């Protein structure tokens, strides 16, 4: 079995309006993390995600995050396979683990997440 997608990230110009829309449309539960980020959960076991506050929304800016054991190792392997390193390992805060990004050989941005 392959690595699991654990988080999807989108942008929003108005987090309160976004929360209202998706709560009413899909019944998603939201939790604010500061003034610029709203996390959502689709169900107890379903994939969740978050909305970044952004001034401009550009189609195609959705990022999904794949769970990996160690971010630098995943980035190194991506480079070996023709990809590139994006954001190096960075703490999320609040005990929520670490994140980074890589680009596939076509330039698609892929988020990666690890607990350690």
Image (spheres, rainbow, N blue to C red):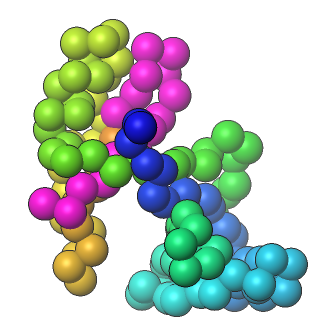
Picture layout, residue 31 above or below residue 43: below
- The residue drawn where x is 20% and y is 79% is 95
Residue 34 in the image: state x and y as whole percent. 42, 87
Q: Which residue is situated farthest in the right direction here? A: 25
Question: In the picture, which quadrant includes the N terminus?
Answer: top left
Residue 43 in the image: state x and y as whole percent. 62, 78
Picture layout, residue 77 above or below residue 20: above
Picture layout, residue 72 above or below residue 34: above
Please report the bounds of the magenta region as a residue range: 102-116
- Decide which of 68, 71 is in the foreground and name it: 68
Is 52 left, or right, of 28 in this rendering? Answer: left
Is 60 left, or right, of 82 in this rendering? Answer: right
Residue 106 in the magenta stretch? The answer is: yes
Residue 47 in the magenta stretch? The answer is: no
Picture layout, residue 48 above or below residue 38: above
Is 49 left, or right, of 27 in this rendering? Answer: left
Disc tally is 0
Residue 99 in the image: state x and y as whole percent. 28, 55
- The residue drawn where x is 63% and y is 87% is 29
Is 40 left, or right, of 12 in this rendering? Answer: left
- The residue drawn where x is 13% and y is 60% is 116
- Decide which of 2, 65 is in the foreground and name it: 2
Question: From where the camera sits, is residue 40 visible?
Answer: no
Q: Which residue is situated farthest in the front direction here? A: 1
Q: Quadrant of residue 33?
A: bottom left
- The residue drawn where x is 61% and y is 45% is 61
Residue 58 in the image: state x and y as whole percent. 69, 46
Question: From where the camera sits, is residue 97 visible?
Answer: yes
């Amino acid at each position: 079995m392959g690595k699991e997608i654990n988080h999807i990230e989108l942008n929003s110009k108005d987090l309160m309006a976004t929360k209202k829309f998706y709560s009413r449309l899909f019944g998603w539960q939201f939790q604010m993390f500061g003034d610029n980020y709203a996390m959502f959960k689709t169900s107890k076991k379903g994939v969740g995600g978050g909305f970044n506050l952004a001034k401009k929304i550009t189609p195609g800016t959705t990022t999904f995050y794949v769970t990996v054991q160690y971010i630098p190792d995943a980035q190194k392997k991506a480079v070996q396979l023709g990809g590139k390193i994006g954001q190096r390992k960075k703490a999320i805060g609040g005990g929520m683990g670490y994140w980074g990004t890589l680009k596939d050989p076509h330039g698609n941005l892929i988020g990666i997440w690890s607990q350690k």
